[in-house]
Image: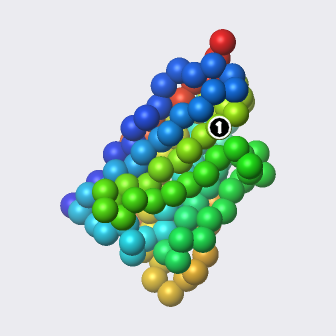
Amino acid sequence: QLQLVESGGGLVQPGGSLRLSCAASGINLDNYAIGWFRRAPGKELEGVSCISRSRRTRYADSVEGRFTVSTDAAKNTVYLHMNSLDPEDTSIYHCAVVNNYGYTYCGLTEVEYNDWGQGTQVTVSS
């Protein structure tokens, strides 16, 4: 059974850093495109970053240069490294996966993913 579990969220001061983890079970992440999404209170779900099956990465303009997505195949885990955090980054962060065999890209929209984790809260505040 496919399961995605996010961790690593918490309270951080503006300018600080966090590393979110998304541990997968029941699947081999090597065969999946993986996306990171966030939802702030009162706002729509936003695609933050993704990594394709060929391990190409994409980032939303709002996080480009500050966030980095990476994978650890041995741990079957994907990470979102977040630097220079701003209060605007406060959200619940979710990872999601799709087995988009034959595609070399990854998407930043909700409909492109099939399975989701429960999310981890990130709060950026002084």
Q: Nearer the viewer, residue 109 or 54?
A: 54
Colour theme? rainbow
Instruction: Work out whether 108 lies above or below 41.
Output: below
- State the residue at coordinates (58%, 60%): 50
| Residue found at the very far bottom of the displayed protein | 102
Towards the viewer: 38 or 59: 59
Task: Name which quarter of the figure residue 26 lies in.
Answer: bottom left
Q: Is residue 52 left or right of residue 99?
A: right
Query: Crowding at label 1, few (<14), some or many (≥20) Cα neighbours within 10 Å?
Result: some
In the image, is residue 86 above or below residue 114?
Answer: above
Q: Is residue 18 visible?
A: yes
User: From this viewpoint, which residue is outermost toward the top?
Assistant: 126
Residue 117 visible in the displayed image: no
- Residue drawn at 34 percent across, 45 percent down: 5
User: Which quadrant of the figure contains the N terminus?
Assistant: bottom left
SS under mark 1? loop
The C terminus sits in image quarter = top right
> What residue lies at 34% left-to-right and 51% top-to-bottom?
23
Residue 56 spot, x, y in % from top left: 60, 71
User: Looking at the picture, how far across and down is residue 104, in whole percent?
Assistant: 58, 80
Quadrant in which residue 12 is drawn: top right
> What residue type is disc 1 on?
Asn
Q: Position of residue 94 (x, y in %)?
A: 48, 45
Q: Residue furthest right?
A: 61
Q: Name the residue located 47 percent from the left edge and 50 percent from the top edge.
A: 79
Q: Is residue 1 above or below residue 104?
A: above
Residue 75 located left or right of residue 68:
left
Q: Which residue is mark 1?
A: 83
Residue 115 location in percent, x, y?
40, 59
Determine whether 108 is above or below 53 in the image.
Answer: above
